[in-house]
Amino acid sequence: MKVRILSATVGILLLAGVVVLSMYYPFAWNIAIAILTGTAVHEAVTGTHCCRSKLIRQISVVYGASLSLLVLLRHGSLLIIAAATMLYIMAVFVIGMKQNDNVNFKQVSSVLSLTILIACTFLCITFVRQFEGLKMALLMVAIAWLTDTFALFSGMLFGKHKLSPVISPKKTVEGAVGGFIMCIALCMLGCWLYAEKVRGGEICIDLLNLGIVTAVCSVVSMIGDLSFSFVKRYYKIKDYGKIMPGHGGVLDRFDSVLFVAPVFLILCQYLPFVGEVVKCN
């Protein structure tokens, strides 16, 4: 547990450094996400041994890392990202057919699905930062990590009933409920304190919408965690990587965030809380 806490502390400090740097140089966020994406894709396609082709694994990492950087092009970036995705898919198939003695369709489909899933969900984190702002991006990450953290502690204290015995034996129903409740409570308290104490009441927080956003994303974060655990169990691996002692790899730490990102981005378009701030009269 000490190693886990120390590793988490180092990770939070690194995140804080990226946040501060991106306040002055917004492209720093894109670069950080590109590095995380490339690392996560490398962990997924290498750790699972889902594809024997080294060349396919290499271009998968390059493709994943490039998406957040392509956003910096601004004009026509979505079109370029779509084109890059199609080129990547075609390249994987061409290499797979060229190396058909060593690569089969199952390997091609596995590496494509994992890479595109990871790359596109990390891209959504970039979009949240770009379209909704840095504070919303941090809230999104906080929802996922608060759910995960308090699910762990709640499970340790009260856990009796297994949530998914085969996929993730250590997760419990009590842990999931505890993580869900604490996430909503802390996010609502934190946002209210920010609005009232830090901003002096200059902005209004719609607590109902905030509660809905947090509740939905908290559940989605647990689905994301279980989904990537499902992949690990299929390939019989404990962690995707070892870059974060006590936590595993980048993908082990961001698995829940990745599923939250696109859902949070969609909710931002329809709920007033996650749109433009409303000044109080």
Image (cartoon, grey):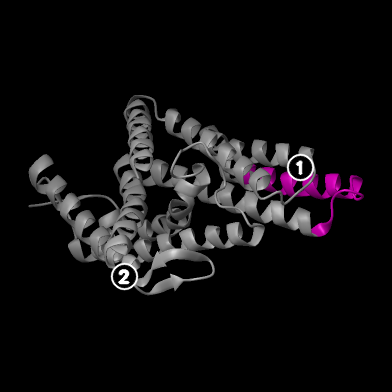
Res. 209 mark? none
The image position of residue 220, as x and y in percent, is: 42, 63
Q: Is residue 222 visible?
A: yes
- Residue at figure coordinates x 44%, y 55% from the top left: 256
The kind of residue on which mark 1 rests is Ile
| Residue 84 located within the stretch drawn in magenta | yes
Q: Earlier in the sequence, mark 1 or mark 2?
A: 1
Magenta stretch, residue numbers: 80-105
- Residue at figure coordinates x 66%, y 56% from the top left: 113
Q: Which residue is mark 2?
A: 174
- Residue at figure coordinates x 10%, y 52% from the top left: 280
Q: Is residue 108 above or below residue 159?
A: above
Q: Nearer the viewer, residue 199 or 179?
A: 179
- Mark in front: 1 vs 2: 2
Q: Is residue 124 visible?
A: no
Tag 1 near tag 2, CB within 8 Å = no
Q: Main secondary structure of the magenta part?
A: helix
The kind of residue on which mark 2 rests is Glu
Q: Which residue is mark 1?
A: 56
